[in-house]
């Protein structure tokens, strides 16, 4: 009984304890939730933290939001900062203007978690983790060596009041410690202007574990970065390097000593050991570096294991001898105008390799290479290969080389003697299955080259002696589907050789490179073949050592065939070229290149585009630009016997017969260049300017050309542009061979294709960035149903406008003269203004030429005969090139003699009311009609018609909604009284009413004056628009 009672008491005690603890947890959770969501909200917390940070740092600090967290970081409290930015004030002047170098750091997110139990139990602030996501850090050092990250404010002790320390008070914080630091997807830029160093690291990742904030700390550091760039004094030294570092680190903040041990550095997959120490000096702002690095290479087998297994098999039973040494140092002071020196050395002694089951062995391998880099340029920087010696079976290679003055003026000196039997190499090394080599190499070379000569294209100064020959070479990898094959490849150089063709009697350099049949196949995606070819190079001795050395070359290529990925096919016939390089006449230090090339044939096919050229050649001279050495000014002549081009984006076959094109700096000159496009033909004479700048830098393309043509078929050309635009989307990203023959034929345009222009016309947008001036003389132009001939005049395309000045032409058996301005910058709308005069044109032909006249002046269809017509107009055009009638402004007049008024329903009704003599053909002595168009209303001034014994006057108004109101007055007739007829309504429903004659006398002095004045104003307005276009182009 007592035991049951005891158990009951214990159970109740446990029960109440659990309930109490659970209640406390709930209360704590509720309290924390209230603190986070109601008291320390981001809206209240963010400005407070910003203010404290700005007070503590010599920088401008901004955060988008700061949130206190607990539940997401349980059991730790966290501070979640979003989108922060720190701008240093170290270099800020009194004007408080920030520049780009002041941006110290920005980040997307920063999360800091704190252990609350450590503070409650030991008064320690322990930051469990500091995570920074996507930071961009700009570490800038100015010309005086002052770093921009030194932003901690130093307290002014002189201004502080003297306070007696209270030893009895309790410490609120015992210590601060940071355990883990993480940086993800960062970008670090180091810009040291004092030493002219610049480094950029992308995708930076940093992990630091340990007691980071203690006076003496032990840390584990891991760093990863990609695309490392390193510049020194404007020279790019390192590019596209992936770098990694894992290391232990000891930090002594009292002595500013940083020690690395157990460090492993990974550079593009190659691992090195790293160790040493760095000691800082806060007074001189320098860092004393004493580091050693090296590769742990137990034996030569470790080096062989670096060869990819896809080439060389791994063989654990291989007998490998030899010692390997790989080490280096980084030693010196880093600070203003001071950079440590880097030295390195790699040695392989008494190396030998024998693979099990292989008939031959690598009998001897020796390597000795060392280097030193001093970016301060106080000590020599160099890379020296004292010896690379390799011997085995029928192969022996002996190579030495040195690059002197690596930083300032690199010079390569090298000696090589080599005899290599590729077949025997396959019997020494166990290559991966499917990898095979055949052929022989014999080489003796001596090289002395200055890198600056190559950069300045001063190739004649290169000193290369000896030769190299490969015979029956085959390199094959079945796994990678790679094949290289050549019957023979030769390379030979000599200096100070006898040459009776030059006055000095000797050549400075004489070299030849040639091969007999080369085949390359890479996975059937790239197939290349070239027949026997060679290059012969020679230079002459220098009379002036400061001048560019003279150099010449004779080149001959055999037939070439190239196929790439079923997207490109190239075939080139036998070709030969003569090249030369020497000093330009104007400046002996500036190189001038000359090239003379002859080519039997060239055919290129890519994605439906085709180019065919026969008997092509060019003779060019090019001089380097002194200000920008990447630019060469070229002049000369390019010619060919026949050229054919076809492209689906403009599916008409283009052909050019024998043509000569002259090149000059900044322009291309054409002298009777013939071009046939479908039915159209063009003969061009003149010049095209700024072609390279227009294509490469989007500059303005200019041209002044005389255009002669027998016929231009605008219908076919516009159809080609329409079909080509549709083809563009079809062939984009589609390989030609992936399309069926039927689909390819659909992309073509038959030579007999026609195009009805007035049914599917669209606004033609004049391309921007062109300034063309054409002097035209064209025999025939087809446009829609119109047939124009004898066209001559001036056309200008500029500022997305087309200007026709005093253009003369003949159409519909009538002579015409026009001045026009057309402007369209978008496909939705265009503007047209023109002044047109046509003499002796049939009324029916006039209506066919300008169908809108039938709408604007319906009674015109009732006349037959020859008239003179003159109109000045301007209007906006919609996307289908139709006139936007409300915007139409025009003034016109029509004069005719000996016309015929045809009998019709309207005339029959009028003649009945006015008692005319009704005939099928009523002769009219003359007619003169003047009308104005404005605000959608056509005002037809009264005009007189004399017919038989009658004289009538007609006038009225016509609206764009096709309603009209005319009046016909009888001025002279056998009838003893005057009468008139009012005609109103529409063409479908006309109303006739007899009235009094409104027109007493037809000679109204203001009518022609008003029309002439309006025409004059319109022509003046068009001329002003043309002038403004010209001024804009000049500016």
Image (cartoon, rainbow, N blue to C red):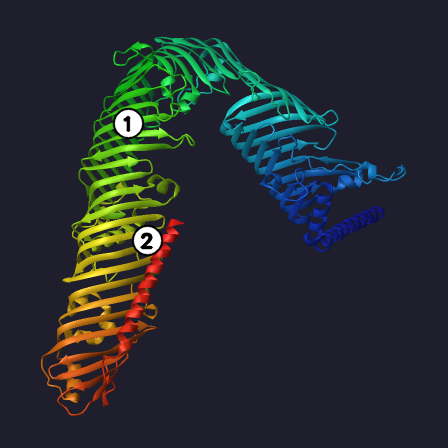
Query: Relative to 152, is 428 above or below?
Result: above
Instruction: Tell me residue 174's x, y (percent).
Output: 80, 36
Instruction: Tell me residue 949's x, y (percent).
Output: 11, 84
Nearer to us in this view, 786 or 357: 786
Task: Please name the residue shown 17% across and 89% down the image.
Answer: 913
Instruction: Tell me residue 380's x, y (percent).
Output: 54, 16
Horizontal side of residue 778 vs 81, given as left or right: left
Residue 765 at least partly seen: no
Residue 400 lies in what quarter of the image? top left
Horizontal side of residue 234 vs 277, given as left or right: left
Query: Relative to 781, is 181 above or below?
Result: above
Horizontal side of residue 951 vs 69, given as left or right: left
Nearer to us in this view, 519 or 660: 660
Q: Label 2 neighbourhood size at 10 Å, few (<14), some (14-19), many (20+)? A: some
Nearer to us in this view, 91 or 40: 91
Q: Earlier in the sequence, mark 2 or mark 1?
A: 1
Residue 173 lies in what quarter of the image? top right
Spatial separation of the CA atoms under disc 2 and disc 1:
38 Å
Nearer to us in this view, 816 or 197: 816
Q: Residue 595, labelled with which disc?
A: 1
Instruction: Tell me residue 868's x, y (percent).
Output: 18, 68
Horizontal side of residue 840 vs 364, given as left or right: left
Task: Please name the residue shown 15% across and 92% down the image.
Answer: 976
Q: Label 1 neighbourhood size at 10 Å, few (<14), some (14-19), many (20+)? A: some
Residue 582 at least partly seen: yes
Q: Secondary structure at mark 2?
A: loop
The residue tagged 2 is 766
């Amino acid at each position: 009984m007592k035991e049951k009672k005891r158990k009951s008491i214990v159970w109740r005690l446990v029960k109440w304890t659990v309930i109490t603890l659970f209640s406390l947890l709930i209360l704590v959770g509720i309290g924390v939730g209230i603190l986070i969501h109601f008291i320390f909200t981001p809206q209240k917390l963010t400005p407070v933290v910003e203010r404290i940070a700005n007070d503590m740092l010599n920088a401008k600090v901004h955060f988008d939001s700061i949130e206190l967290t607990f539940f997401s970081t349980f059991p730790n409290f966290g501070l979640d900062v979003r989108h922060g930015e720190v701008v240093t004030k170290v270099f800020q002047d009194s004007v408080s203007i920030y520049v780009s170098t002041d941006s110290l750091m920005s980040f997307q997110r920063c999360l800091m978690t704190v252990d609350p139990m450590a503070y409650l139990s030991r008064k320690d602030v322990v930051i469990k983790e500091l995570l920074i996501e996507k930071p961009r850090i700009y570490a800038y050092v100015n010309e005086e060596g002052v770093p921009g990250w030194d932003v901690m404010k130093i307290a002014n002790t002189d201004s502080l009041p003297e306070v007696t320390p209270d030893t009895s008070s309790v410490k609120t914080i015992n210590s601060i410690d940071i355990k883990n630091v993480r940086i993800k997807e960062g970008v670090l830029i180091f810009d040291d202007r004092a030493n002219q160093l610049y480094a950029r690291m992308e995708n930076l990742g940093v992990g630091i574990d340990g007691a980071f904030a203690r006076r003496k700390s032990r840390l584990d550091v891991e760093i990863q970065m990609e695309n490392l760039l390193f510049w020194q004094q404007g020279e790019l030294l390192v590019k596209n390097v992936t770098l990694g570092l894992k290391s232990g680190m000891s930090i002594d903040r009292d002595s500013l000593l940083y020690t690395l041990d157990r460090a492993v550095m990974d550079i593009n997959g190659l691992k090195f050991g790293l160790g040493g120490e760095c000691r800082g000096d806060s007074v001189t702002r320098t860092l004393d570096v004493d580091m050693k690095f090296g590769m742990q290479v137990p034996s030569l087998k470790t080096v062989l294991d670096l060869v990819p297994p896809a080439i060389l098999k791994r063989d654990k039973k291989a007998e490998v001898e030899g010692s390997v040494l790989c080490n280096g140092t980084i030693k010196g002071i880093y600070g203003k105008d001071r950079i440590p020196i880097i030295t390195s050395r790699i040695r392989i002694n008494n190396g030998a390799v024998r693979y099990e089951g292989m008939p031959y062995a690598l009998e001897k391998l020796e390597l000795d290479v060392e280097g030193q880099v001093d970016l301060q340029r106080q000590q020599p920087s160099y890379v020296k290969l004292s010896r690379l010696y390799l011997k085995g079976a029928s192969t022996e290679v002996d190579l030495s080389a040195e690059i002197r003055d690596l930083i300032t003026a690199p010079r390569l000196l090298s000696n090589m003697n080599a005899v290599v039997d590729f077949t025997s190499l396959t019997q020494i090394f166990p290559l991966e299955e499917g990898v095979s080599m055949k052929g022989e190499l014999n080489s003796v070379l001596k090289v002395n080259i200055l890198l600056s000569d190559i950069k300045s294209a001063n190739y004649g100064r290169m000193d290369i002696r000896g030769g190299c020959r490969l015979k029956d070479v085959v390199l094959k990898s079945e796994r990678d589907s790679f094949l290289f094959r050549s019957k023979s490849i030769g390379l030979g150089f000599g200096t100070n050789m006898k040459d009776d063709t030059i006055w000095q009697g000797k050549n400075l350099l004489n070299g030849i490179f040639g091969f007999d049949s080369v085949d390359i196949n890479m996975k059937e995606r790239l197939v290349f073949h070239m027949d026997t070819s060679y290059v012969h190079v020679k230079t002459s001795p220098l009379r002036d050592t400061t001048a560019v050395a003279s150099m010449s070359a004779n080149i001959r290529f055999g037939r070439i065939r190239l196929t790439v990925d079923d997207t490109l096919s190239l075939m080139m016939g036998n070709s030969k070229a003569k090249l030369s390089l020497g000093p330009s006449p104007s400046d002996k230090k500036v190189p001038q290149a000359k090239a003379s090339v002859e080519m039997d044939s060239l055919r290129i096919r890519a994605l439906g585009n085709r180019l065919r050229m026969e008997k092509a050649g060019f003779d060019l001279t090019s001089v380097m630009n002194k200000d920008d050495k990447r630019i060469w000014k070229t002049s000369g002549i390019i010619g060919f016997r026949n050229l054919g081009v076809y492209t689906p984006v403009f599916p008409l076959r283009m052909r050019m017969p024998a043509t000569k094109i002259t090149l000059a700096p900044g322009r291309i000159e054409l002298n009777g260049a013939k071009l046939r496009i479908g039915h159209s033909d063009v003969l061009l004479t003149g010049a095209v300017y700024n072609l390279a700048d227009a294509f490469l830098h989007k500059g303005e393309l200019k041209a002044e050309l005389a255009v002669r043509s027998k016929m231009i078929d605008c219908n076919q050309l516009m159809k080609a542009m329409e079909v080509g635009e549709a083809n563009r989307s079809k062939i984009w990203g589609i390989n030609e061979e992936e399309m069926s023959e039927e689909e390819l034929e659909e992309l073509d345009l038959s030579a007999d294709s026609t195009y009805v222009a007035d049914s599917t016309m669209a606004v033609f947008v004049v391309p921007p960035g062109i300034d063309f001036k054409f002097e035209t003389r064209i025999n025939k132009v087809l446009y829609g149903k119109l047939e124009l001939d004898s066209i001559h005049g001036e056309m200008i395309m500029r500022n997305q406008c087309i200007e026709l000045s005093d253009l003369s032409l003949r159409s519909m058996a009538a002579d015409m003269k026009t001045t026009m301005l057309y402007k369209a910058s978008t496909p939705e709308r265009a503007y047209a203004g023109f002044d047109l005069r046509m003499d002796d044109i049939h009324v029916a032909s006039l209506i066919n030429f300008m169908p809108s006249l039938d709408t604007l002046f319906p009674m015109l269809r009732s006349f037959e005969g020859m008239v003179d017509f003159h109109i000045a107009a301007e209007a906006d055009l919609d996307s289908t090139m139709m006139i936007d009638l409300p915007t139409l402004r025009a003034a016109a007049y029509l004069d005719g003699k000996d016309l015929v008024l045809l009998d019709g329903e309207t005339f029959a009704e009028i003649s009945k009311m006015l008692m005319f003599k009704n005939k099928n053909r009523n002769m009219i002595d003359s007619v003169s009609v003047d009308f104005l168009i404005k605000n959608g209303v056509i005002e037809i001034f009264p005009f007189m018609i004399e017919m038989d014994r009658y004289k009538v006057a007609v006038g009225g108004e016509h609206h764009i909604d096709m309603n009209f109101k005319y009046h016909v007055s009888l001025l002279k007739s056998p009838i003893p009284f005057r009468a008139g007829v009012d005609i109103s309504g529409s063409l479908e429903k006309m109303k006739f009413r007899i009235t009094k004659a409104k027109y007493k006398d037809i000679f109204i002095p203001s009518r022609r004056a008003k029309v002439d004045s309006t025409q004059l104003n319109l022509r003046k307005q068009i001329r002003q628009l043309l002038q403004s276009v010209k001024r804009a182009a000049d500016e």
